[in-house]
Amino acid sequence: MSVPKVKRQVGKYELGHSIGEGRFAKVRLARNLETEEQVAIKIISKEKVLKHKLVEQIKREIATMKLIKHPNVIRLHEIDHGRMGEAEARRYFHQLINAIDFCHSRGVYHRDLKLDNLLLDASGNLKLSDFGFSTLSQKVRDDGLLHTACGTPNYVAPEVLNDRGYDGAPADLWSCGVILFVLLAGYLPFDDHNIRNLYKKIAMANFTFPSWFSFGAKTLLMRILNPNPKTRITISEILEDEWFRKGDEPSVLDGNYETNLNEVHSAFKISQDHHETGNEEQPAALNAFELIGLSKGLNLESLFTIEQALKRETRFTSTCSANEIVRKIEDAAKPLGYDIHKKNYKMMLRNVKAGRKGNLNVSTEVFQVAPSLHMVEVRKDKGDTLEFQKFYKTLSASLKDVIWMSEED
């Protein structure tokens, strides 16, 4: 006789089958044994989170989710593909705008709004998910703007791409406009295989409407997909729009706004004897936009190979830790006659002997591309370019156990 399989229980939840898996977490279907309600439980590897220093990111996402108690904000089911009729698309757009309006009222900007992050519950209600790129209004700089370019290229607002700072609220609204277009059309308003051409289309709001769009939908979308954030329609104006107001549905809010991270701090409490503290400086992180911008011709291949044309600067990638990379560069440069000044993950190397154009000064900085992948930029600040090329050739030979190579290399 076969023995019945015993299901694992976590607190009051009985775990079911796996419904998703990522690099650091798994998502499993579960049942609340007290209410019989089905939920999704995200199981995170504490060891991997500590190893890759993702504790603050986890805390931020949980804090954001605890801060926002709204019927249209939570992770549950996936949304259907294909275009919708206007009535159905408007219903989901109502819920999306209500959710974003509430987020903004709490000082939260999502910054990665896209169709993939809009899910449906068993009743067909929209749920906003994935606050991994979200930020709070307190994070703006002295100019009152956000400066981290993030999000998904096809959905991102033009002002996010120009690297001069942006307001989180109109940037989120632009993404909502893209979502509404996709719901009604079944395809993206801005799309191109060439990322540079895509950015040009976004910057100029270069798109066309399908023939089946109503006049009211076109009018609203033209006001949302306005490349000028200062004259772009606001949420309060959307709420008064004639097309939007058809079939308006009020949202019922949960009045519990308590934000308590004691459980999170407890779960990820790190011993001073075994792990680095969160107060220690970390390498600057590179997101997809900055990574693309560093690559000539928008071809990322040059970032991951050593053989590239050396002029005033060059880059290499490494799977070593940031601290190890800095130590190895220091060990390699000292025997070559360089004075070294360090600040966190930036270094200034100065050759004590003058060359053809004075002393060669070289700066290096370590950037984090992914938790286990770093990019190192080596730049000539002063001196002869040929001497810099010779220096880098010698340096890279000393760093052969640090520089990452593919299997083909």
Image (spheres, rainbow, N blue to C red):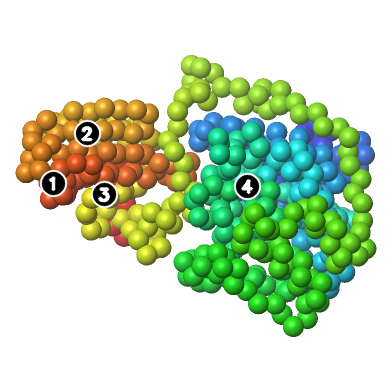
Check disc 4 and give the amino acid type.
Answer: Asp
Crowding at mark 3 (Cα within 10 Å: few <14, some 14-19, many 20+): some
- Residue 71: x and y in percent read 85, 46
Q: Is residue 308 left or right of residue 354?
A: right
Residues tagged 2 and 3 counted as in contact (Cβ below 8 A): no
Crowding at mark 1 (Cα within 10 Å: few <14, some 14-19, many 20+): some
Residue located beneath label 4 in the image = 167
Residue 92, above or below 166: below
Image point 75% across, 38% down: which residue? 106
Outermost residue, top side:
273
In front of the other: 61 or 53: 61
**Dot 3 or dot 4, earlier in sequence:** 4
Residue located beneath label 3 in the image = 313
- Callout count: 4
Residue 116 found in image quarter: bottom right
Between marks 4 and 2, how big is the CA–CA gap? 38 Å
User: Under tag 1, what secondary structure?
Assistant: loop
In front of the other: 20 or 264: 264
Of circles 1 and 4, the one toward us is 4
